[in-house]
Amino acid sequence: MRCAVTGGAGFIGSHVVDVLKEAGHDVVVIDHRVRPHRSDVTYKDVDVVEFSAVLNACAGCDTVFHLAAVSNVNYAFEQPAYTVRLNVDGTANVLEAARHLKMKRVIFASTVWVYTGAREDRCDEDSPFYMPGAGHVYTSTKIASELLCHDYAKLYGQEFTILRYGIPYGPRMRDELLIPIFLKKALSGQPLTISGDGAQYRNFIYVEDLARAHLLCLGEKGKNETFNLEGARRISVKEVAETIQRLAGGDVKIIYTPARPGDYAGKEVSNARAERLLGWKPTVDFEEGMRRTLAWYRSR
């Protein structure tokens, strides 16, 4: 199969490319700012906000994995209009290209942030959105993009799979993410800064576990389905800091600052559907994943 991966040179995208190549697929990386980490893929320097460029880049592909987006929530807070353009218009362009090219499926990278406004504390893929509680431009763009996937399936018969990511970590992380920020500070002897009291949590998921699900969802069981891809257990931001403090060694201090506006406090999100239909579940525990991540970070 020939697969396009928008954002395929990024953190998660590069691991998705690895999984697809290992499974024997041809891969076209569609990215605008970063070149891919490997030479055995086709690279298209394309911005997904340009429809004609997306259409041309996807020609000849059977499936597109759409990961290109503003994913840094701090940047989304500072640049809301651009975030809407890239995240929502970009998704519409990918769906429209898939429709014109009669591609089999669009696999869309969403997020567990869509549960921010959910009324219940424990959520699964059928939990309803509560729109006034979305709480962040980033969240709203992902909800809007999910709605577009459903619309394209209903109106045009375009297959989709929605993957709601937990918070990933691992090799090739972007430097502005929480764990690399903490790692860099710890290794340089600076204190680790936590927004709020540190009780806010994520079910952090090791990136190779996350990437593996993209391959598993390609079959019929992934058709027009939504899957949560969370880590095995909740990890508070405080635990992240304390784990790095322990693994990095030395005298690493932890300090606290006021909470960020619109921060995702965390929900209990079920992976049961992905395990039942895809046979997927996370296998790398947080401690081991952090050891691997720290080793990669030091090797740089």
Image (cartoon, rainbow, N blue to C red):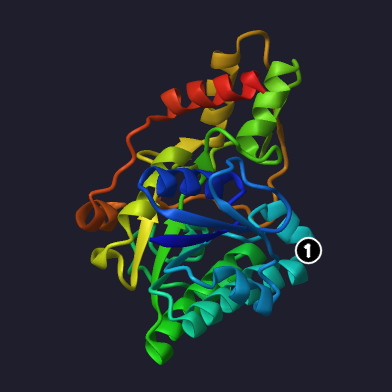
Q: Is residue 2 above or below residue 212?
A: below
Q: Position of residue 201 (x, y in %)?
A: 50, 42
Query: In this view, which residue lies farthest toward the bottom?
Result: 155
Q: Is residue 192 above or below residue 106?
A: above
Residue at the (64%, 19%) spot, across then down? 298
Residue picked out by circle 1: 79
Residue at the (24%, 65%) spot, across then down? 221
SS class, disc 1: loop
The amino acid type found where label 1 is placed reads: Gln
Q: Nearer the viewer, residue 257 or 211?
A: 211
Q: Is residue 205 left or right of residue 259?
A: left
Q: Position of residue 206 (x, y in %)?
A: 45, 37
Q: Is residue 115 left or right of residue 260?
A: left
Q: Which of the 4 image quadrants contains residue 122?
A: bottom left
Q: Is residue 87 above or below residue 100?
A: above
Q: Is residue 201 above or below residue 48?
A: above
Q: Quadrant of the C terminus?
A: top right
Q: Nearer the viewer, residue 24 or 202?
A: 24
Residue at the (61%, 65%) spot, across then down? 135
Q: Nearer the viewer, residue 268 or 249?
A: 249
Q: Total of numbered circles in the picture? A: 1
Q: Is residue 134 visible?
A: no
Q: Quadrant of the N terminus?
A: bottom left
Residue at the (42%, 89%) spot, across then down? 156
